[in-house]
Image: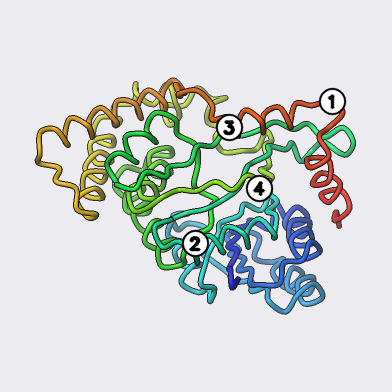
């Protein structure tokens, strides 16, 4: 389907993990492009390139400035890529090639869809088969035809669109909005949520009922580290930061500008109330993780992940994770 997978990596910290993820991807039948942006551990780039030459001719490894914002580096990777579609992958995550192609096929069929992905499994990569420690990550789609009702509905039950498949120009535009938010707020949370706002305002967010992504969750995750330090950079303590109000107001202004860009009359009192009510729902989620009830399909995914013995579909993915270790 001509998809580019974009992976930022610090080779000094994740060299072996990255090799495992690339091996998983290509051994499971992926044939398109991967662009790896090395933002740390540049002295191991040639080792990585040697590994990639054996694995696939479609892997590109580029050196990036680690002092540059993450979002700026992701824009750079997307601009260097050649795929019609793009998807972001962490160097501690696994992405299922068939599910990526199915998501790209949906985008090709339906121009009203901005982002498509399947369902997520959370995996502790320090554990091993058959005793993998796994969980699930709840997602909600946003399929309303019009931007404002779609926005209002999604604000009640945020998921994530960060690792979804996008048309590459929209991937770049979305990441540019996130980069602008990051540059103006220096907020570790709001810039990611700006990506969600972009997705559901610009078009539909569709979820395919299949396992799409295995997300690595471990003690070195940035969010876990910041939460462990009771940091003002993370919920719920972020609202106590002296910078929160100004950061939030910039974020809010970005939301209004996005809605205006798709033709919503934000000056209309009824529309404005609907937007503000949606933002109140969003803040409730961001700070307290308040969500509406689970969709039936998401409840089924939660059951699949918690089954003992492990559900066959989940077990197959975990076996592939083990079989492709390098």
Mark 1 vs mark 3, CA separation in Å = 31 Å
Instruction: Find residue 136 and report its image quarter.
Output: top right
How far apart are the alpha carbons under marks 1 and 4? 21 Å
Q: Earlier in the sequence, mark 2 or mark 4?
A: 2
Instruction: Determine the CA span between mark 2 and mark 4.
Output: 18 Å
Q: Position of residue 144 (x, y in %)?
A: 37, 43
Of the numbered discs 2 and 3, the one sitting upstream in the chain is 2
Q: Nearer the viewer, residue 302 or 128?
A: 302
Q: Residue at x 66, y 53 (%)?
A: 91
Q: Are marks 2 and 1 in contact (CB under 8 Å)?
A: no
Q: Which residue is mark 3?
A: 225
- Foreground residue, 191 or 137? 137
From this view, report whether residue 249 is shown above or below residue 206: above
Q: Earlier in the sequence, mark 1 or mark 3?
A: 3
Vertical side of 317 occupied by 62: above or below: below
Kindly report the distance in space between the C-alpha atoms of the residues bearing marks 2 and 1.
Answer: 35 Å
- Tell whether 238 sits left or right of 294: left
- Disc 4 is placed on an element classified as strand
Mark 3 nearby-residue class (10 Å; few <14, some 14–19, many ≥20): some
Considering only order in the chain, which callout, 4 or 3, is on the residue closer to the N terminus? 4
Quadrant of image for the C terminus: bottom right
The label number, if any, that marks residue 107 in the structure image: 2
Q: Which quadrant of the figure contains the N terminus? A: bottom right
Q: Which residue is mark 1?
A: 308
């Amino acid at each position: 389907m001509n998809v580019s997978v974009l992976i930022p990596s610090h080779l000094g910290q994740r060299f072996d993990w990255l090799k495992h993820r690339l091996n998983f991807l290509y051994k499971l039948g992926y044939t398109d492009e991967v662009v790896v942006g090395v933002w740390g551990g540049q002295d191991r780039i040639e080792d990585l390139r040697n590994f990639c030459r054996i694995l696939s001719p479609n892997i590109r490894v580029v050196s990036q400035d680690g002092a540059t914002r993450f979002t700026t580096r992701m824009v750079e990777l997307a601009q260097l890529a050649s795929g019609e579609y793009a998807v972001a992958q962490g160097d501690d995550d696994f992405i299922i090639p068939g599910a990526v192609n199915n998501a790209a096929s949906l985008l090709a069929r339906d121009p009203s869809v901005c982002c498509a992905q399947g369902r997520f499994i959370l995996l502790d990569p320090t554990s091993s088969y058959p005793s993998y420690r796994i969980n699930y990550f709840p997602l909600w789609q946003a399929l309303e035809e019009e931007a404002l009702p779609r926005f209002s509905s999604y604000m009640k039950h945020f998921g994530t669109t960060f690792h979804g498949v996008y048309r590459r120009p929209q991937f770049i535009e979305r990441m540019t909005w996130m980069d602008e938010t990051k540059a103006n707020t220096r907020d570790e949370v709001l810039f990611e949520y700006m990506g969600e706002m972009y997705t559901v305002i610009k078009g539909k967010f569709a979820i395919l009922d299949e396992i799409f992504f295995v997300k690595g969750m471990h003690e070195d995750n940035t969010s876990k580290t910041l939460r462990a330090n009771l940091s003002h950079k993370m919920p719920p303590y972020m609202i106590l930061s002296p910078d929160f109000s100004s950061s939030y107001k910039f974020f809010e202004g970005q939301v209004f500008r996005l809605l205006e860009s798709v033709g919503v009359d934000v000056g209309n009192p009824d529309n404005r109330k609907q937007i503000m009510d949606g933002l109140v729902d969003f803040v409730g989620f961001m700070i307290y993780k308040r969500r509406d009830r689970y969709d039936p399909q998401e409840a089924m995914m939660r059951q699949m992940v918690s089954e003992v013995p492990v559900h066959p579909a989940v077990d197959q993915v975990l076996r592939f994770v083990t079989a492709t270790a390098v």
